[in-house]
Image (tube, rainbow, N blue to C red):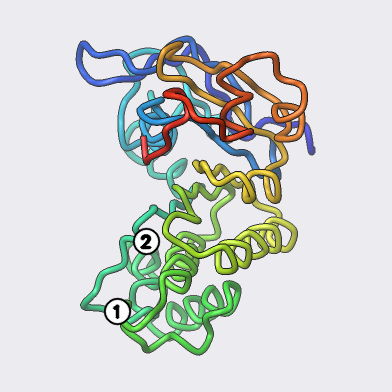
Amino acid sequence: MADEPIIEVKDLVAGYEDTVILQDINFEVRRGEVFAVLGGSGSGKTTLLKNMIGLQKPLRGVILIDGTDVVAAEGEERLRVLKKIGVAYQSGALFGSMSVLTNVALPLEEFTDLPRRAIDMIAQMKLKAVGLQGAAYKMPSELSGGMRKRAAIARALAMDPKILFLDEPSAGLDPITSAQLDELILQLSRDLQITFVIVTHELPSILTVADRVIMVDKDARTVIATGTPQELRDQSANPVVRRFFNRQLGRDVRIDNG
């Protein structure tokens, strides 16, 4: 089962109307692995993420989530496949007027018919899983940046997804808090046996948590490297990849949220 793909991206072309940002994208994410998407400024990382989670329709190509084509799926079939994924955005995207517990409970309220007591119990369990059991009745404004990231992950876990997408999870965090978040990702991967897809540019995180990575490039508009982080760091002959991992100055590795 370890080598069985849970996500398959085939001949993907992604962009906006007549503007192609990515083309000829082909890769697989294996069941249970921590998979990272890397790239420099404007390389299309976020565009790829939006296509994979169904927020944006590809210009061409196929994206299979657990065997179902998320691009072609409609109605109940599309809802079923989207329930298999959870997403934690870079900003956390918590509702500031709601408690942390209520934020985590939102997916359960929207997609299940569970009674309130059961929803609150599940939400408390998810908060405990990310180490926030004492913060249930706090407001997001009362949390540190790292705690808000954890709360967002707890909400993404609410529906027991098979795949968890994390958009720049370490962005804006100090090195200690970032390392603690890396440990949480590894712990959740081990304990829950779910697949992680992480968009990130943080080298310590990449080297700590990722089993495999792909790197997309703005100029090539496609995947320029695939492998383990160590393989790309130590063996790649591509100068863009080498500069990314060695953080040498150059226009190819200016990093932002692209």
Element under label 1? Answer: helix
* Label located before the other in sequence (1 or 2): 2
Q: How many other residues sit within 10 Å of disc 1, few (<14), some (14-19) or many (≥20)?
A: some
Q: Type of residue at label 2? A: Gly
Q: Is residue 6 left or right of residue 230?
A: left
* Image coords of residue 203 (percent x, y): 61, 44
Residue 142, x across and y down, in percent = 34, 84
Instruction: Choose between 190 and 20: the one closer to the eye.
Output: 20
Number of numbered discs visible in the structure rendering: 2
Give the residue pinned by disc 1: 141
Q: Which mark is residue 31?
A: none
Task: Judge from the rendering whether residue 203 lies leftward or rightward of residue 21; answer left or right.
Answer: right
Evaluate if marks 1 and 2 touch, with contact meaning CB atoms under 8 Å apart: no
Residue at position x 46%, y 59% in the image: 156
Q: Which amino acid does the dot numbered 1 rest on?
A: Ser
Give residue 255's quadrant in the image: top left
Q: Is residue 209 above or below residue 10?
A: below
For disc 2, the neighbor class at 10 Å (few under 14, some 14 to 19, many from 20) is many
Is the N terminus in the top left, top right, bottom left or bottom right quadrant? top right
- The picture places residue 36, in percent across and down from the top left corner, at 59, 38
The kind of secondary structure element at disc 2 is loop
Residue that numbered label 2 is attached to: 92
Instruction: Give the Cα separation between the discs numbered 1 and 2.
Output: 12 Å
* Up-down relation of residue 65 to residue 166 (above or below): above
Residue at the (30%, 31%) spot, across then down: 56
Task: Tell me: residue 123, above or below residue 153.
Answer: below
Identify which residue is drawn at 53% across, 22% down. Answer: 9
At a point 50% along the width and 83% down the height, the residue shown is: 121
Query: Where does the image place residue 88, in percent across and percent down from the top left?
Result: 43, 55
Q: Quadrant of the C terminus?
A: top left
